Image (tube, rainbow, N blue to C red):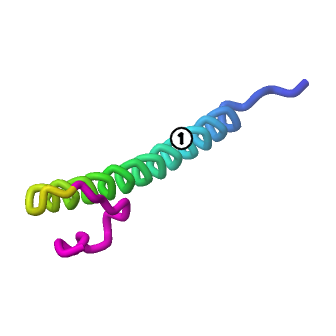
């Protein structure tokens, strides 16, 4: 009586693909941001350690490096 049309199957498949692509894009942006902030904080800490011999770190990759006098 009712026939499945190829359009409805193709439409749902396109929807699933779009959702997967958007999810992967969001995941990529989140991971890239986290890695970038972590690397920035790490290299600021390494530079401070090389200059002072003191291992103090700041977890925020966007803030300025800690003062050398502290």
Residue at disc 1, secondary structure? helix
Quarter containing the N terminus: top right
Q: Is residue 20 left or right of residue 6?
A: left
Residue in the image at 9% along x and 56% along y: 50
Q: Write down the quadrant of residue 45 in the picture.
A: bottom left
Residue at the far right in the pictured view = 1
The one of 16 and 55 positioned closer to us in this rendering: 55
Disc 1 crowd, CA 10 A, few/some/many (<14, 14-19, 20+): few
The one of 65 and 24 positioned closer to us in this rendering: 65
Q: In this view, does 52 lie above or below 35?
A: below
Residue in the image at 47% along x and 47% along y: 27
Most common SS among magenta residues? loop
Q: Where is residue 21 in the image (x, y as percent from the top left)?
A: 48, 44
Q: Position of residue 24 (x, y in %)?
A: 47, 43
Q: In this view, does 12 lie to the left or right of 35?
A: right
Residue in the image at 87% along x and 27% along y: 2
The one of 62 and 1 positioned closer to us in this rendering: 62
Q: In this view, does 10 lie above or below 49?
A: above
Q: How many labels does the image show?
A: 1
Residue at the far left in the pictured view = 51
Instruction: Specify the segment rendered in magenta.
Output: 55-70
Q: Does the magenta segment cover residue 63? A: yes
Q: Is residue 46 left or right of residue 62?
A: left
Quarter containing the C terminus: bottom left
The one of 39 and 57 positioned closer to us in this rendering: 57
Q: Mark 1 points at which residue?
A: 20
Q: Write down the quadrant of residue 63 in the picture.
A: bottom left
Residue in the image at 23% along x and 54% along y: 55
Q: Does the magenta segment cover residue 26? A: no
């Amino acid at each position: 009586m009712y026939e499945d049309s190829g359009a409805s199957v193709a439409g749902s498949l396109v929807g699933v693909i779009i959702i997967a692509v958007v999810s992967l894009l969001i995941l990529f942006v989140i991971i890239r941001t986290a890695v970038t902030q972590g690397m920035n904080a790490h290299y600021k800490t390494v530079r401070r350690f090389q200059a002072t011999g003191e291992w103090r770190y700041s977890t925020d990759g966007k803030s300025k490096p800690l003062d050398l006098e502290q």
